[in-house]
Image: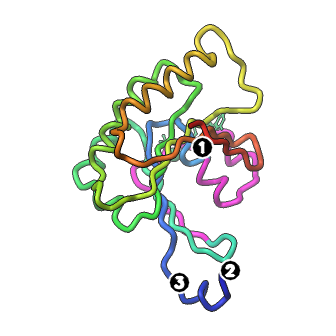
Amino acid sequence: MKTLKTIESADESIKIVLIGLDNSGKTSILSCLKGIKRISAFNSPMPTKGLDVQQFESLHSKYAIWDLGGQQAYLDDYFNDFNKYVKGANKIIYVIDIQNVKRYEIALEYLEKVINSIDKKSNIDFSVFLHKFDPDLVFDRDLNEKVINNFIANIKETIPPEFIYSLYKTTIYAIFEKSTAL
Ligand SMILES: Nc1nc2c(ncn2[C@@H]2O[C@H](COP(=O)(O)OP(=O)(O)OP(=O)(O)O)[C@@H](O)[C@H]2O)c(=O)[nH]1
Ligand SMILES: [Mg+2]
């Protein structure tokens, strides 16, 4: 159990990097992590312009969330000095909009670029969030279990076998829903 002393002496923030295509839900996830409950914060958040760092305290821990805007204009810039963004990070979360089947392919390509840019020796905690996995998700011809399972298989094929990661289904439409997809 952590004592107050250990919490106080641990003055370094927990750094989490959110990365992925535009509109995948990174800033919304950040708002959830911050405990924001105002529905207006989720209605139509503005696209994040490049890097946005948010610092806050929750459950006696300090957090620094690095939200990397996913609009096309910024996507490649991050790789000019990727280490600048991930240096000292405790966790990287790659966010994919599971509802946007048309962009699965490009989300996979960008995931591959991100993983290739990570220093494998750093053993960084890496998660892929299959986001917008809402409780009332309606399956149809384009989006169904088969399509999703096939996509998950493609993710597993894209990520080198020796690279350790976790894969989660996530949504902002639940107080705390995070179920493993592996
Ligand atoms: N259905 C559904 N919509 C979501 C969820 N999370 C976010 N959204 C919506 O997805 C849209 C984009 O969310 P953002 O959080 O702005 O996406 P982003 O990844 O930060 O986008 P960029 O800043 O452009 O990179 C918004 O309209 C959100 O309300 C979710 O879990 N389910
Ligand atoms: Mg954003």
Q: Say if mark 3 contacts mark 2, CB within 8 Å.
A: no
User: What residue does disc 2 label?
Assistant: 1
Mark 1 residue type: Pro
Q: Say if mark 1 contacts mark 3, CB within 8 Å.
A: no
- Where does the N terminus fall, quadrant-wise? bottom right
Left or right: 19 with respect to 44? Answer: left
Q: CA distance from mark 1 to mark 3?
A: 33 Å
Mark 3 residue type: Ala
Left or right: 170 with respect to 15? Answer: right
Left or right: 105 with respect to 95? Answer: left
Q: Residue furthest left?
A: 80
Quadrant in the rendering for residue 125? bottom left
Region rendered in magenta: 29-56
Residue 84 position within the rendered picture, expressed as x and y whole percent measured from the top left: 30, 61
Residue at disc 2, secondary structure: loop
Residue 106 position within the rendered picture, expressed as x and y whole percent measured from the top left: 38, 27
Mark 2 residue type: Met
Q: Residue furthest top?
A: 141
User: What residue does disc 3 label?
Assistant: 10
Q: CA distance from mark 3 to mark 2?
A: 14 Å
Residue drawn at (33%, 44%) of the image: 115
Tag 2 or tag 3, which sits nearer the N-term?
A: 2
